Image (cartoon, rainbow, N blue to C red):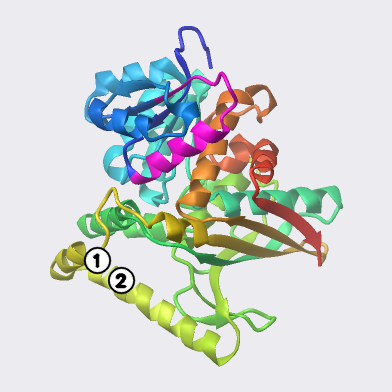
Amino acid sequence: MADGGRTYDLVVYGATGFVGRLLAAYLAEHAPEGTRIALAGRSRRRLEEVRDALPAGGRGWALVEADSTDAASLADLAGSTRVLATTVGPYARYGLPVVEACARAGTHYADLTGEVLFVRDAIERCDAVAKETGARIVHACGYDSIPSDLSVFLLAQRAAADGAGGLRDVQLVATARGGFSGGTIDSMRAQVEALQDDPALRRVVGDPFALSPDRAAEPDTPQPRDASLPSQTPDGRWTAPFVMAPFNTRIVRRSNALQDWAYGRSLRYGEVMGVGRGPLGAVTAAGVSAGLVAAVSAMSLAPTRALLDRVLPAPGSGPSEAVRQKGFFRMIVDAGTEDGRRYRATAAGKGDPGYAATAVMLGESALALALDGDRLPDRAGSLTPATAMGEVLVERLRAAGHTYEVTVR
């Protein structure tokens, strides 16, 4: 990426939204002194309000007005910065023009999407252009899907270093405490509506290799189905469907393919949510499974969707600071290898995973793209956190207080 004429190192686009404000506050406290940061959004007045409420490190930042429906403003925005981090969703509704502007300008890009259809569209439209300009387009830089992506990346690294061969059966069990924001719910609603408008898209979403760079070259290794019923792990833990698994698993498989299947062509990767042991765990797993099915069904029907709109958080809202501070995430990833050895990765952190912890993940991703270019993998195009930033991002997140470790079982 050429830096000539770039005014900023990093721009936070969507800074007036719920997660955008959290990201801006994190950067104001943790970005190195001298990092040139700006806040961008549609309303200068609201941007001023956000800036005025930031810790001291962010109160002198520049403000940039830009709108995803105004191509000229997006082109100017992308051309002004080395990195653009966007929290403006649903990404399928607002995100493609932003990705396109960054790809054309050779500007590195990071987002928080958990939308398979958006990432698929962004790959098709922007991957080739970004490779030509040198832009790193990095999706899923939050709880979707950094813990999953980096955990499998580290497992594969350790297995290769030990001469254990590629990964085979890998399962992530997630436990977390946190809240939901209106933006997350709006993204879920947008994808449900897209599937209703075009039923053919269900095949795309249901394809375990939906985000592969070369679908025809993918191995025929059967993949675990996205869980829909309660189950038990070999050590007796009850599990339920993990709402993020249908996206996270596709990101991990894309990482594998982008690295010429370095994790192993026999990789089988799945994710579930851990809910406890014994009779209480069984009851909880059944309740979570039923609740998830009910929620998706309700969003699929116009009358019940309208009712949900009245009671669920609105876009721009989210959990309170008290809820965010009490939250946590912990992901245990067990893996077998081609020679039979077994490993376990742990990814964990404090704070509501979708908000407090995600602000750390996106903030450190953006800083890595802006400041660590000479240490990053030599790749451009439509990437994943593991393939764009790899070990550099792991180091940054560890320094920020998150846990990423691999042990032999």
Q: Which mark is residue 295?
A: 2
Occupied quadrant, residue 49? top left
* Residue 313 counted in the magenta span: no
Residue 104 lies left or right of residue 93; in this view the side is right
Q: Amino acid at mark 2?
A: Ala
> SS for tag 2?
helix
Q: Position of residue 168 (x, y in %)?
A: 70, 62
Which secondary structure dominates the residues rendered in magenta?
A: helix
Image height check: is 187 above or below 3? Answer: below
Residue visible at 46% across and 7% down in the picture: 5
Q: Which mark is residue 299?
A: 1
- The boundaries of the magenta stretch are 18-38
Q: Position of residue 243 (x, y in %)?
A: 44, 65
- From this viewpoint, is residue 213 visible? no
- From this viewpoint, is residue 342 visible? yes
Occupied quadrant, residue 11? top left
Q: Are marks 1 and 2 in contact (CB under 8 Å)?
A: yes
Q: Amino acid at mark 1?
A: Met
Q: Nearer the viewer, residue 318 or 119?
A: 318
Image height check: is 57 above or below 158? Answer: above
The residue furthest right is 162
Q: Nearer the viewer, residue 287 or 99?
A: 287
